Amino acid sequence: MELRGQFHFMDRSTNGKTCNAMRFMLDLATQDEYDLHDVSNVDVLFVLDCCYSFMATREASTTGRIVEIMSATARENPRTVTPPANTFTNKILDEVGRRHRDGHRYIEIANLVERLRVQGTAIISPTHCLKTGAASVCIPLAGLAAVDPTTIPPSLQAVFRVEIVDNMAKVDMERFTDWIRSLPVNVAITLEGIYPTGSMCLILSSAYSVYSKLAGMKGYALITEATGSNLLPQLRTEAPVTSIRKK
């Protein structure tokens, strides 16, 4: 729960006793005064079988370290902590076990959450966010390792917008479009539209696992999630042929 602007754990069985999880857990991994710098070569993954939602925006990060959070849901709801909704950890283990049996080389946490979101509900849907870094933790899986995870099609798409303060010149838009098209398949982003809005608004789509690594940064906002692709390119663009009656 959020209490005085900080993330807290609350024990419902002891008259609502709380613990400042932000101070005693998350900040230990993210703040410099705790000596976890890039040279520490330590990535941290928090798995919360409860509600967690990050509202504060963050700057783009170039650090080599990763600190990320995955939780059962972003919505605070009593059903989050009552059976059968308290099986988030078990769902993680089931999906990891399935990919291990299928021979995956590794599992990316952002992609894992993407898959679990497809299996979620309107009330309880897993969430993921980065606190530090620009990538997601990858956990190697022992065994046959025949499947390259980067070749797996996304199970969930995210459509999102990016607000840019300055207007983009035509040459800048062309360079940006070329860069978008050059991205590898596993991190592909599709440019759906560019709109002048006093500044500039980009409409983009990608796998949800790609968007979730950008979520929370200033100017980024989710529009919708979809299990299918954009149908517009499939429509015929030719103008309809109208018959002319002879007089």
Image (cartoon, rainbow, N blue to C red):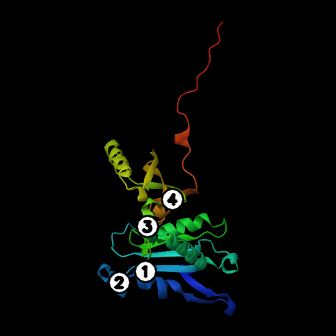
Q: CA distance from mark 2 to mark 1?
A: 10 Å
Q: Reading the chain from its start, which is encountered first: label 4 or label 3?
A: 3
Of callouts 1 and 3, which one flags the residue occurring earlier in the amino acid sequence? 1
Mark 4 or 2: the one toward you = 4
Q: Which one is earlier in the sequence, the residue at label 2 or at label 3?
A: 2
Locate residue 146 relative to residue 172 in the image: left or right: right
Residue under label 4:
154
User: Which residue is most to the left?
Assistant: 39
The residue that disc 3 covers is 146
Residue at which label 1 appears: 44
Q: Amino acid at mark 1?
A: Val
Q: Position of residue 3 (x, y in %)?
A: 58, 81
N-terminal label among 2 and 1 = 2
In contact (CB < 8 Å): disc 2 and disc 1: yes
Q: Label 2 neighbourhood size at 10 Å, few (<14), some (14-19), many (20+)?
A: some
Packing grade of label 1 (10 A; few <14, some 14-19, many >=20) is some
**Percent from the top left, x then y, of residue 203?**
48, 50
> Where residue 205 appears, x then y in whole percent?
49, 53
Horizontal side, residue 174 vs residue 119: left or right = left
Residue 36's disc number: 2
Q: Amino acid at mark 2?
A: Leu
At label 3, which amino acid type do we have? Ala
In this view, the residue farthest toward the top is: 247
Q: Earlier in the sequence, mark 4 or mark 2?
A: 2
- State whether residue 55 is above or below residue 178: below
Distance between the Cα atoms at labels 2 and 3? 35 Å
Residue at mark 4 to residue at mark 3: CA–CA distance: 19 Å
